[in-house]
Image (tube, rainbow, N blue to C red):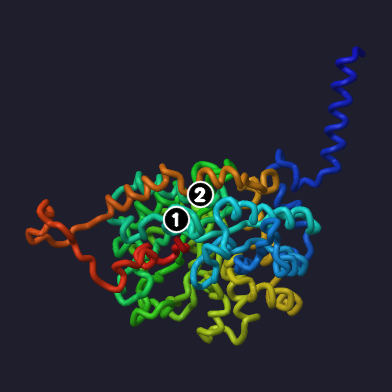
Amino acid sequence: MNIKSVLTTCFVICAVHVSAQTPLYKQSSAPVESRVKDLLGRMTVDEKIGQLCCPLGWEMYTKTSKGVVPSELYKERMSAAPIGSFWAVLRADPWTQKTLETGLNPQSGAKALNALQKYAIDSTRLGIPILFAEECPHGHMAIGTTVFPTSLAQASTWDKELMYKMGETIALEARLQGANIGYGPVLDIAREPRWSRMEETFGEDPVLTSTLGVAFMKGMQGEVQNDGKHLFSTLKHFAAYGIPESGHNGARANIGMRQLFSDYLHPFKKAVEAGAGTIMTSYNSIDGVPCTANKYLLSDILRKEWGFNGFVYSDLSSIEGITGARVAQNHKEASVLALKAGVDMDLGGNAYGKNLRQALKEKLIGMQDIDRAVANILRLKFRMGLFENPYVSPEKAGRTVRSRAHKELARQVARKGVVLLKNEGILPLSKQLKSIAVIGPNADNMYNQLGDYTAPQ
């Protein structure tokens, strides 16, 4: 045997030995389903339940003179049971009380998510990376990002290619800062003008909403999600959310099955067929059944009939809302109903985090119910490539987010979205005019003119 053969044999033996020592779920060459099964088999009950929780994220970091570090609250949450996802770590607005001073810019935001991710990988037993979810309906809702017009203006462009480019740009800015999931687009068909969330939608037409919404979603997700440029989209809100009784947000939707399927579910069906990664339930009920507990919608239709293979988020505290709707006696029963209906991830994290272990002990649910939900979440983590490439480049985020090209794209969407409702000889403006008065409470209030889900400017 010559030296080349000896070296080749040694290399093969060493490779086999290393492979035998490395858990299957950490082997990038293994099939995704094999990795999911291997990791599930290694997890404790608490670790599994932790993967089903998505707490609020903006309290999970601390700014110090030496940089951004995980907060003590974050370490506490991760030590109790490693968390599957955090929502809106980078969000800044009056609600979060994150300002231009207390919040994070794109570069420090990337450093923050890297720090949180590193803690999850290095300081927990199995080193499962986190899915960071961020609000992205008309731009990533974080300081220093590109703000696009809201969805009603987007709809007025009638331009699906432009919506694709916009989705691609929003995803890139969020992904460069470490996000993996972008909440958006909003596919609610809005036909109740008293409803307070009209501006989040593409309007009242299901065909236009489907066409533009699918283009937006495909731009966000791209062909693959492990390229460092794209992320998983979250479709909102499932279902019939835009017609609440009396216009009250989250009130019941009074609707028949034919209209539900032909109008209100149509955009979601098209987006699921196009490969949407995640979907979010809505606060309302249909025919007395809260959407977050509706097995017919979440399992029979969404998964079995439409073939959805991602995972389902609850809306914030909507699992607890099942109790408020008097469909469940307490939050434990509400958690059981939601899990069995097909809700995988609890946005807020308190319903599943505080109740599923006891529900399992009382045999109200089985381990197969928990494993099904956990598998749906782990599957997307492997598809995202988080086990191989969990970190991002803060320097690249600082250079790219809100670039000149991105701002020009936002201007293009704004220009195409302008609608002239009536013109009685006012336009075009006379060149003889010396001044124009802009009057009203928002005349000089830039923040109010940018729509909801917008960070401080």
How many numbered circles does the render carry?
A: 2
Residue positioned most to the top: 2
Q: 314 or 327, which lies in front? A: 314
User: Would you identify the image quadrant in which residue 371 lies?
Assistant: bottom right
Image point (20%, 65%), residue name: 437
Residue positioned most to the right: 1
- Mark 1 vs mark 2, CA separation in Å: 8 Å
Q: Which residue is mark 2?
A: 173
Residue 341 on image: x %, y %? 57, 70
The 10 Å Cα crowd at callout 1, few under 14, some 14 to 19, many 20 or more, is many
Mark 1 and mark 2 in contact? Answer it, CB < 8 Å: yes
What residue type is disc 1 on? Gly
Q: Which residue is mark 1?
A: 139
Q: Quadrant of the N terminus?
A: top right
Secondary structure of the residue carrying tag 1 is loop
Residue positioned most to the left: 425
Image point (47%, 71%), residue name: 282
What residue type is disc 2 on? Glu
The 10 Å Cα crowd at callout 2, few under 14, some 14 to 19, many 20 or more, is many
Secondary structure of the residue carrying tag 2 is helix
- In this rendering, would 277 be left or right of 285? right
Image point (60%, 66%), residue name: 58
